[in-house]
């Protein structure tokens, strides 16, 4: 390792220790109460989290406690691998995602005000181009994070899923924004505060669920149910996404952190 590299790593370590770099938790708490996407019949649904006690400081194990967990791959703050969607079925599973794709600069696209006015707000390609006009081109390997304020609903399943008479109403990208993200920039992935990376109405788009279809089909990644995006700057943060290294996994619950310079 060169002296320059040593200095850079040391500066990060010193920055965390001194508070000049804040580590921000971007992961929602995971429990039996975590909201889970609900698909209409005849589609099969994923289970949420449940646990069965193996032992708890008793005759089955006097000095330890542990549990058997049952959980779907796509529950809580979680990663979507390319093979999650039919367009990416020949792509990477969770275990084979390059680790360099799991660490990268965060580009925060803030549409909180718009989503407060319209809970089904659709992010457009024009929004993304306007972001670049103000902040510069999104770098290769970036994670584009869609800030909508939806994370405040995460502990209230009804408000979080927001299902009305016509189906779920949640923000997400429209078709052209999905195509732009998949084809115009070499990003690592796209992250949201909602239960899925597509908008609630996206089942009726052409193609249906365009971000799943196009982004995962292009070998990129999705990241859902993020927390604390309001604590990130528009640019300048480093995101670290840490899924299980799950062989054959289409997704994985994920601990996600951001390193944010302060001062």
Image: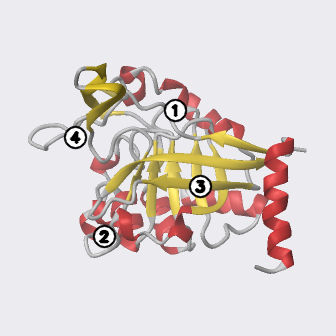
Q: Which mark is residue 235?
A: none
Q: 55 and 227: which one is in front?
A: 55
Whichever of callouts 3 and 1 sits on the residue coming sooner in the sequence is: 1
Q: Earlier in the sequence, mark 2 or mark 4?
A: 4
Tell me which residue sits at (42%, 27%) in the image.
Answer: 160
Residue 182's x, y, as percent?
47, 69
Q: CA distance from mark 1 to mark 4?
A: 28 Å
Cα distance, mark 2 to mark 1?
A: 31 Å
Q: Which residue is mark 1?
A: 118
Q: Residues within 10 Å of mark 3 (few under 14, many from 20)?
A: many
Q: CA distance from mark 2 to mark 4?
A: 20 Å
- Between disc 2 and disc 1, the foreground one is 2
Residue at label 4? 46
Q: Nearer the viewer, mark 3 or mark 1?
A: 3
Q: How crowded is the residue under tag 4: few (<14 C-alpha within 10 Å), some, or many (20+)? A: some
Instruction: Look at discs 3 and 2 and give the one toward the viewer.
Output: 3
Q: Which residue is mark 2?
A: 88
Which residue, given by chain and number where applicable, does mark 3 sit on? 240
21 sits to left or right of 128: right
Q: Residues within 10 Å of mark 1 (few under 14, many from 20)?
A: few
Query: Is residue 199 positioned above or below 169 on the image?
Result: below
Instruction: Point out the residue furthest to the left here.
Output: 42
Q: Secondary structure at mark 3?
A: strand
30 horizontally vs 240: left or right? left
């Amino acid at each position: 390792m060169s002296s320059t590299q040593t200095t850079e790593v040391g500066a990060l370590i010193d920055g965390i220790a001194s508070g000049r770099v804040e580590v921000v938790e971007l992961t929602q708490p995971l429990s039996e109460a975590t909201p889970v996407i609900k698909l209409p019949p005849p589609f099969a649904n994923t289970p949420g989290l449940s646990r069965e006690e193996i032992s708890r400081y008793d005759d089955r194990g006097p000095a330890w406690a542990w549990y058997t967990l049952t959980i779907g791959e796509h529950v809580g703050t979680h990663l979507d691998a390319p093979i999650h969607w039919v367009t990416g079925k020949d792509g990477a599973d969770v275990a084979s995602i390059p680790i360099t794709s799991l660490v990268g600069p965060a580009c925060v696209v803030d549409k909180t005000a718009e989503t407060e006015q319209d809970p089904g707000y659709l992010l457009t390609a024009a929004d993304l181009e306007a972001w670049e006009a103000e902040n510069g081109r999104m770098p290769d390997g970036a994670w584009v994070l869609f800030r909508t304020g939806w994370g405040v609903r995460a502990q209230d399943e009804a408000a979080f899923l927001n299902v009305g008479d016509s189906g779920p109403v949640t923000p997400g990208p429209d078709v052209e924004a999905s195509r732009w993200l998949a084809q115009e920039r070499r990003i690592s992935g796209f992250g949201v505060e909602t239960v899925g990376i597509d908008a609630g109405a996206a089942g009726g788009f052409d193609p249906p669920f365009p971000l799943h279809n196009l982004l995962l089909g292009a070998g990129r990644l999705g990241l859902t149910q993020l927390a604390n995006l309001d604590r990130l700057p528009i640019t300048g943060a480093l995101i670290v996404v840490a899924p299980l290294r799950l062989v054959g996994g289409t997704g994985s619950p994920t601990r996600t952190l951001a390193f944010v310079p302060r001062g």
